[in-house]
Image (spheres, helix red, strand yellow):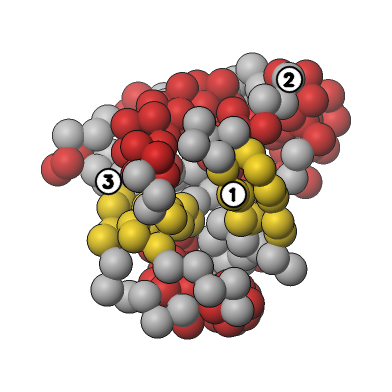
Amino acid sequence: MRHGQSLANKNNIFTGWNDVPLTAEGELQAHLAGKKLFDEHIHFEDVHTSLLLRAIKTANIVLSEINQLYIREHKSWRLNERHYGNLRGKNKQDIKNKYGTDKFNAWRRGFYGLPPLLKASDAINNYCNCGITEPLGESLSMAYQRLISYWTDSIAPNLMNNHNQLIVAHGSTLRALIKFLEVIPDEKINQVEVPNSQPIVYTFDRNLKILDKKIII
Ligand SMILES: O=C(O)[C@H](O)COP(=O)(O)O
């Protein structure tokens, strides 16, 4: 599932790797999603989040609502939101007005659209203590590469052992995962939206082919 509403979501600001908090509304959304997930009676073995506060906080709220705060927790930069480069911190409507709808849509929803890059001197490098260098910007296809390697190494093997996995991440990284799981062509990924805090429950067969998909609203 995607995190609850963040402060940047509320203010229509490009976020990416900026570490913004949930709003009160976002926390409430996470509690509601957790309450609904509780009714699904799914026992998770692991939870996976990005290194970003909005995903970690959402995951903790959901786990508390489903009484599973004790499960194994994994945090990875590979689940971080796609890095919006030099767009981060900027108002989405201002960027649309400045560059036009075509560029805006390509950067925001295209698979290969690479947003304007940060200058290396503007990188924040919050994570240099864990050996991660902040990218200067990513297209969805770049985020897809680093996300799918995490899926293959750290999530798929657990699923194949019949261990349910909870992933709490971000709009773009989840669009990348949905593209992979549902084999969505590059040119159709712009039609996929992932709203805040609506869990998507996939049931897989032994080869991780999708048997069922249910969106918990
Ligand atoms: O990074 C962001 O700005 C959001 O998480 C996703 O924004 P988007 O829906 O504009 O891609």
> Given contact means CB atoms under 8 Å apart, are the residues at marks 2 and 1 in contact?
no
- Ligand 1 is within 8 Å of the C-beta of the residue at disc 2: no
Quadrant where the N terminus is found in the figure: bottom right
Residue positioned most to the front: 206
Query: Residue drawn at (54%, 78%), measured in percent from left and top?
Result: 38
> Given contact means CB atoms under 8 Å apart, are the residues at marks 3 and 2 in contact?
no
Is residue 165 shown left or right of residue 31?
Answer: left
Nearer to me, 158 or 216: 158
Reading the image, the residue beneath label 3 is 126
Image height of 126 relative to 96, above or below: below
Q: Earlier in the sequence, mark 1 or mark 3?
A: 3
Quadrant where the C terminus is found in the figure: bottom right
The reply to whether residue 91 is in sight is: no
Q: What amino acid is labelled 3 in the image?
A: Asn
Helix, strand or loop for disc 3: loop
Task: Please tell me whether mark 1 or mark 3 is closer to you in this view.
Answer: 1
Task: Please tell me whether mark 2 or mark 1 is closer to you in this view.
Answer: 1
Nearer to me, 1 or 216: 216
Q: Earlier in the sequence, mark 3 or mark 2?
A: 3
Query: Residue drawn at (14%, 43%), measured in percent from left and top?
Result: 129
**How dense is the environment of label 1, judged by Cα within 10 Å: few (below 14), some, or many (20 and up)?**
some
**Numbered mark located on residue 185 in the image:** 2
Is residue 134 shown left or right of residue 214?
Answer: left
Reading the image, the residue beneath label 1 is 203
Q: Position of residue 88 (x, y in %)?
A: 54, 42
The Cα–Cα distance between marks 1 and 3, rounded to whole angstroms, is: 36 Å
Is residue 140 shown left or right of residue 153?
Answer: right
Helix, strand or loop for disc 2: loop
Query: Residue drawn at (38%, 53%), measured in percent from left and top?
Result: 163
Q: What amino acid is labelled 2 in the image?
A: Pro
